């Protein structure tokens, strides 16, 4: 997870500003946290080539901003595209597969470790 200097203090989070703050395309993890409030964190996730994340300890919600592909959660596979929302409960194995080069999604984490 990014450190606190990546967090902005405005309640409006422009997608373009988050995209500009992403690590370079060759980075192992292309995620930037842009907002935090209480137990909630909002960031932009835009992997290139492969999604190497592992299960998280809090509930999360992805909102796809661009691109398409397949999402796998605990062995269940679904096709996704722009505008789709994907819920992942804490501890669930998940990953994006066969996603387009322009794939990006807001990711929102919240709640206690172990999920709600």
Image (cartoon, helix red, strand yellow):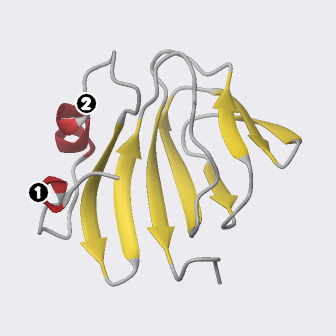
Name the element at disc 2. Answer: loop
Quick check: marks 2 and 1 in contact, CB under 8 Å? no
Which of the 4 image quadrants contains residue 52? top right
Q: Is residue 82 above or below residue 73?
A: above
Which of the 4 image quadrants contains residue 58? bottom right
Which labelled disc corresponds to residue 39? none
Q: Residues within 10 Å of mark 1 (few under 14, many from 20)?
A: few
Task: Pinpoint residue 75: horizontal percent, then vertical percent.
Answer: 88, 42
Left or right of residue 96: residue 35: left
Q: Residues within 10 Å of mark 2 (few under 14, many from 20)?
A: some
Left or right of residue 75: residue 107: left
Left or right of residue 31: residue 19: left
What residue do we see at 28% from left, 71% from top? 36
What residue do we see at 84% from left, 49% from top? 74
What residue do we see at 67% from left, 38% from top? 95
Task: Pinpoint residue 87: horizontal percent, then vertical percent.
Answer: 66, 60
Name the element at disc 1. Answer: helix
71 or 50, which is in the foreground? 50
Q: Is residue 48 above or below residue 10?
A: above
What residue do we see at 35% from left, 53% from top? 1
Which residue was labeled with disc 2? 23
Task: Pinpoint residue 57: horizontal percent, then vertical percent.
Answer: 58, 67
Which labelled disc corresponds to residue 5? 1
Q: Is residue 14 above or below residue 78?
A: below
The quadrant of the picture occupied by the C terminus is: bottom right
63 or 114, which is in the foreground? 114
């Amino acid at each position: 997870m990014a450190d606190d200097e990546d967090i902005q203090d405005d309640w409006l989070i422009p997608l373009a500003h988050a995209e500009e703050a992403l690590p370079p395309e060759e980075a192992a993890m292309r995620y930037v946290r842009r907002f935090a409030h209480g137990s909630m964190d909002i960031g932009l996730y835009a992997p290139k080539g492969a999604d190497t994340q592992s299960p998280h300890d809090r509930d999360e919600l992805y909102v796809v901003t661009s691109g398409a592909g397949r999402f796998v959660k605990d062995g269940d596979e679904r096709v996704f595209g722009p505008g789709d929302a994907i819920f992942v409960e804490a501890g669930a194995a998940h990953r994006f597969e066969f996603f387009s080069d322009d794939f990006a999604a807001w990711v929102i984490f919240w709640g206690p470790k172990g999920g709600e």
